[in-house]
Amino acid sequence: MLVLRTMNWTDALARKNIQVEYWWVPAHKGIEGNEEADQQATKAAYKYCARYTETQNLLPFLDYISFAHVSRRLTEVKWEESKEEIMKLGKKSKHSDRYDLVKRGGNSAVMEAKKTIAARFYQLKSGHALIAKYLLRIGKRRDMKCWWCGHEYQTRDHLFKWCKRWKREQKRLWVDGQEGEDGYEGVEKVFKKLKISLPMSLVFAEEKCSQALMDFISCTDVGRISGVVEEAENSDHEESSDAGV
Ligand SMILES: [Zn+2]
């Protein structure tokens, strides 16, 4: 698209007897003119991208910005949003080391672990976690069978409320809660309702339950795959459709 437009401009200028020459120059080497062009391009891209993220409509801006820039910028935006979410969680918990570690960069193993759990939290919250229902939807599995307990439907609800593999952790999440400084109330107590009548979307939306959910996620492998799924992926190329899963 840019090449076409440039050719049109060249033609227009040629009609006015202005010759245009094209020179290849190495990027980012401090060449005068090129640096200026680079800055202008970045400025324009950010300007249009800001508008894009507001309107969520990319089409009007494709003339001005590259896909690479859009995807990079969106990743930045998403990362900023996750950091905000993590900060909120940190402030909610009595011990805010979750966020502090991310912010200050403490023990990197601990920091990574917390970040992984936070990532799993957002995946589970948004419905994009590695659970059978999602994997079936994106074509990575052929059924919704739970790879922990064999139940027919591994949904988010199943994993957090009923899966036999995580009974102990479920009891703490819904009923017992956790004592002590890092403590939290069981979700049923927070809502004064039984888990059967509480949709997971509601629980994930309630900040009072964030700590309990994070704890549950960190103590279980919910939202993770076991060997079953990799096998399923490998068998995609085979003729037989009932291999693996
Ligand atoms: Zn299960």
Image (tube, rainbow, N blue to C red):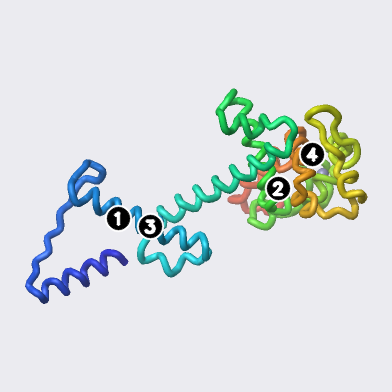
Depth-wise, is mark 3 or mark 2 nearer the camera? 3
Q: Is residue 188 above or below residue 241?
A: above
> Dot 2 surroundings within 10 Å: few (below 14), some, or many (20 or more)?
many
Q: Earlier in the sequence, mark 1 or mark 4?
A: 1
Name the residue tied to disc 4. Answer: 212
Is residue 60 or residue 168 the one in the foreground? 60
Residue 206 is left or right of residue 185, and the answer is left
Residue 86 is left or right of residue 92, and the answer is left
Q: Is mark 4 within 8 Å of ligand 1?
A: no
Rendered image: mark on residue 40: 1
Callout 3, which amino acid? Ala
Q: Earlier in the sequence, mark 3 or mark 4?
A: 3
Is residue 118 or residue 240 the one in the foreground? 118
Rendered image: mark on residue 124: 2
> Dot 4 surroundings within 10 Å: few (below 14), some, or many (20 or more)?
many
Callout 4, which amino acid? Ala
Q: Are marks 3 and 4 in contact (CB under 8 Å)?
A: no
Residue at left offset 9%, top offset 66%: 19
Residue 122 is left or right of residue 67, and the answer is right
Depth-wise, is mark 1 or mark 4 nearer the camera? 1
Q: Is residue 92 above or below residue 202?
A: above
Residue at left offset 62%, top offset 36%: 115
Rendered image: mark on residue 45: 3
Q: Earlier in the sequence, mark 1 or mark 3?
A: 1
Residue at left offset 60%, top offset 25%: 109
Callout 2, which amino acid? Leu
Q: Earlier in the sequence, mark 1 or mark 2?
A: 1
